[in-house]
Amino acid sequence: MEINNKSDFITSEQTATLENFKQLIRNSVTEIFSLDNNTQNVSVEAFLENTDHGALHAFHVYKKAMEIADTVELETKEQVNRGMLYFMAITHDSGRFHISENEKKQIRCERSHNKCGMGQIQKAIRNLKNLWMVVPPKQEADLMDYVYNHDFFNTRLDGDTYQEPKSLEGQITRLADRMSTDISTEARRYWETGKRLKTPYFKEDISFEDRVNFSFPKIRNYIKSGNFDEFTFFLTLLSMSGDDFAHPVMKEIYNEWAKDKHDAIVTILEIAREEEFSEGDIQEMENLIHRYILHFNLTW
Ligand SMILES: [Fe+2]
Ligand SMILES: [Fe+2]
């Protein structure tokens, strides 16, 4: 089986609405790919129900990826494989849904969901081989490379651990994942995730130095020492720019979306109010954001 633009199970009708999209996941993922298998402790149902990184998010990523693909094809004449966009959209965060009775194990998998996601893809490809359907090695490599690197922000935040995905489809889906909704909705989605993982919203005792020195390879140490809150992720959200995308068309698309980043700041402070932080704390958060923006000279 080759994943292509006309894969039988990916028609535009099947992906038109969230309900149809979910049904397609039930059919293609549960039945064909057998990801929902107790021995693997993966729950497709949890994926379908979740609203921060589950089917709803995958749906938005897929739709956005299709839109970006149209622009890229129009402006560069490059050909995008839309079947790959579908597979990438539904598998990039699926590693977060490694439901286990061991809560610690489950959270570990959520934090390293790229690696758990790669395990799921490998299993899916093995299952397909048992059905005499072979995914070409190049496509398998592109899927694995994308899922491994999908959360790459930039070298300041990731060091050399991750890099931009190599394939055009991987680069498109990475961009779509960063801008699948407007920026305020994106900030609220981060918040939803934080609540689900019981991450504190804001810890005032984290020093500015620790804030600016944060990077993803250090995340374990930050969590262990208690220097970690949801605010950390908001600062990473503000840290990206079009320059973090090598493809010239994607650079421009991201910059256009990022023009509204000031709205994200308003939302972050709005959520703090909903979380019942004092006006003094909220002022401190606002100052911190502006200091951080100045420190790294972030512009959108
Ligand atoms: Fe992710
Ligand atoms: Fe995602």
Image: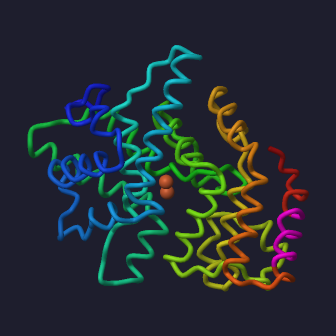
For this rendering, which residue is in front, 51 or 111? Answer: 51
The percent coordinates of residue 68 (x first, y second) are 53, 31
The image quadrant where one finds the N terminus is: top left
| Coordinates of residue 297 in the picture (x, y in percent) | 88, 51
- Residue at the image position 30 percent from the left and 83 percent from the top: 101
**In the image, what residue occupies the spot 47% across and 45% down?**
61
Q: Is residue 288 magenta?
A: yes
Q: Residue 268 in the image: x percent, y percent?
A: 72, 66
Which residue is at the front of the view, 114 or 72? 72
Judge left or right: residue 73 versus residue 32: right
In this rendering, the answer to whether 284 lies above or below 83 is below
Q: State the residue at coordinates (53%, 42%).
A: 176
**Is residue 104 toward the left or the right of residue 179 in the image?**
left
Dominant SS in magenta: helix
In this orientation, which residue lies closer to the viewer: 125 or 82?
Answer: 82
Front one among 129 and 5: 5
Image: magenta residue range: 282-291
Q: Is residue 144 above or below residue 94?
A: above
255 on left or right of 113: right
Please tell me whether residue 149 belongs to the stretch shown in magenta. Answer: no
> Residue 88: x, y in percent?
39, 43
- With respect to residue 237, does 283 lie above or below? below
Dividing the picture into quadrants, the one containing residue 238 is: bottom right
The quadrant of the picture occupied by the C terminus is top right
Residue 1, above or below 278: above
Q: In this view, does 206 lie to the left or right of 53?
A: right
The residue at the far top in this view is: 77
